[in-house]
Amino acid sequence: MTPVTWVCLGTGGVGKTTIAAALAATLAARGQPTIVATVDPARRLGDAVGLPGLLGLGNVPGQPNLTALVPSPVTGVRALIARWLTQFPAHADRLADNPLVEAMTGGLAGIHELISLAELAQHRSAAAVPSTLVIDTAPSRHALELLALPTRLGEIVDGRALRWLGQLARQAVAPTRGLTSRLARWGQNRLVQTLSIAIGEAPIAAALALLALASDVQPELSEIVANARAMLDPSQVYITIVTSARPGAIDDLEAIRAALTKIGHAPALVIINRVPAVSPRALVTHPAASPAIRACARLASESIEAARTAAAEITAHVRRWGITAIEVPTLSPSDPIEVVAAVAAVLGASTLDRIEDAGLFADARPQRVVPNA
Amino acid sequence: MVPLAQSDMTTPGPRIWSTRSSLVTFACSSASNRCGICAPTVTDISSVAWPLTLVLGKGGVGKSTVAHGLAELMGTSGGRAMVVEPGLGARLGHDPIREVSRRYSVERIDELDALRDAAAIIFGSTRLARAVMSQFAVRQLATVVPGLREVSLLVAALTRVDSGSHVVLDMPATGHGLAWLTTVGLLRSLAPAGRARTLVDRLHERLNDPTFTRLVVVTLCEPLVARETFELCNALPRPPDLIVINQVHRPPLLDASDLASLARLTDLTSEAAALAQWAKPSPMPLFEIAPTCELPLGLDRPSAPDVARALAARSS
């Protein structure tokens, strides 16, 4: 079987991490080597798989086919640059104490996605056996940014931009009389000068030093980006939208689907998390119930029935998209590992089998899978 | 649905301290009103003393709802208030607020617009900024180079403050929201001079000025969420000025004798269990580092005045 990627996304607080861990457990339980990874800087994945505080790769206890991965930007950036410097020692001087590298390892916004993507792609392509990847994402737009990132990076790394910037960087470092047209060089110098006046010479020099290295390691960058692209290519990805059973959820789902369409993706599965199973309606009129219980039962019934109706509407709605919605009931355990196990039991291997059997590849979309129909 | 609005909000219910407050490393100095025991007054919450309010918290806890409620409160107390929604890290889908009131405005700022505006400040010329930004390599890099868009959006919020508004910035979820603040400090060490440094310095100074920027953290009374909130509070450059605990049901809907009689209804065991589960009192996290304020359970897509009223009524 071709290894694929499952991406869990959704608005905040719907239980993406739990669902991702449960999905991964289900896939691993049927013998498929699986990596579950998070790109959410909130890093709750370790708790969900019983490896609290996990950073890097870890074998999930009790599940031989399942590995968890929590990328670390700090060690990631340092390791990459150290490796490149052994290949191109000429850059070592100018990159020692480079303030830009320092800032990148210090938690600059956005670096998390870049490094997570590189680490995920690397682990996926380096795995001894082809592994299915399950990715838990950060809320809302950050997930979509991640899906679009390989293409955007590809435009830079494989396009004109890096070549142009690399040339500019090399020239700024050691001016050479090459074949570059003087006009182009004049333009590049003007840009560097303008930026240096506004931003300061040191950060521009730091950026140029990094760009010069980047242009030397372009083939490797290109390979990393190609791996990331393959990993998140629409023909390889099951997008799983996780939602809660709220009346407004359909609007959210439509907005997510529209945003996905824009970047060439389509949802493959919707999971409605925490659908309450039983309404205490009968207690409202129960003769033995006290007035307090009756009043409370009335409120609870209204709220629970609203959630159940919302779940049914979501299921009917996404069926019109041609995909399946799975309802996961509200589960009572408070321990995250127990919740994950319970959710995995609900998801069940057979449902995932059917979704995979329905075909994934672009021409097979939209998939038509209707559960228990 | 307003199940709890009818109950008496002033009666404090039993508190269940389920989360370890030892995770909190900030010293609690009751003298400076940074103690859970010292109650902030309603005017504290609605105060227009802070020109900038940053609303932080885990995904899905109700940051946007609280942002709109705070803007409404500030708008009511006389200031010009606005909610700024940065396009980067924005929510997907419906607005959490049913209706926005006229007492404040809402602006959604696109990150590329913010980037261009910040560049105009740095280059001292809109035309020059546009020329640099139109360079294809610069434009392509600008969206993937870490930190640029985030800082530009913070600068954009500050620009709105300068034009006389009290700005409530609805930040992205935990890790990303925190990264925005970290990035400002990191960029300072990057640019030792120049106009960019002046701008980042000003941003840094404003964000770290407790009389200018108010940090509001939103959380839920769920152990896992509370734990992430503790971690967030510890990672912030200073303790938050206010913690809003959302979706609290207090006083408890059913007391011990109700629960006992519920257990005796043997003919409807699954219904009784469902009700007991639903009415389970929220375990209240104890935050010693900041004044807290509660929002009741059941505010589903409220209007901004609903949130404002609830915030004002439930300040502890």
Image (cartoon, coloured by chain):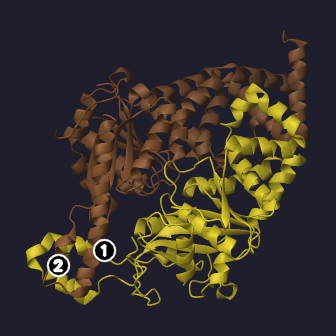
Chain colours: A brown, B yellow
User: Quick one: B23 or A307, which is closer to the camera?
Assistant: A307
- Where residue B134 appears, as percent x and y from the top left, is 78, 29
Q: Secondary structure at mark 2?
A: helix
Query: What residue would you read off at disc 2?
Result: A285
Q: Is residue A200 visible?
A: no
What residue occupies the far left of the structure in this picture? B267
Q: Quadrant of residue B316?
A: bottom right
Q: Local crowd at mark 1 within 10 Å, few (<14), some, or many (≥20)? A: many
Residue A62 vs B18, above or below: the answer is above
The label on residue A123 is: none
Residue at the (43%, 79%) spot, across then down: B5
Checking the image for residue A299, the label placed there is 1
Instruction: Name the foreground residue: A173 vs A14.
Output: A14
Residue B95 point in image, percent of width and height: 52, 55
Label 2 neighbourhood size at 10 Å, few (<14), some (14-19), many (20+)? some
Amino acid residing under circle 1: Leu
In the rendered image, the quadrant that contains the C terminus of chain A is top left
Q: Residue at x 22, y 50 (%)?
A: A346
Q: Which chain does the residue under circle 2 lie in?
A: A
Residue A207, above or below B54: above
Please name the amino acid that badge 2 sits on: Thr
Q: Looking at the image, which residue is at 76% across and 64% down? A: B165
Q: Is residue A7 left or right of residue A190?
A: left
Indicate the secondary structure of the residue bearing disc 1.
helix
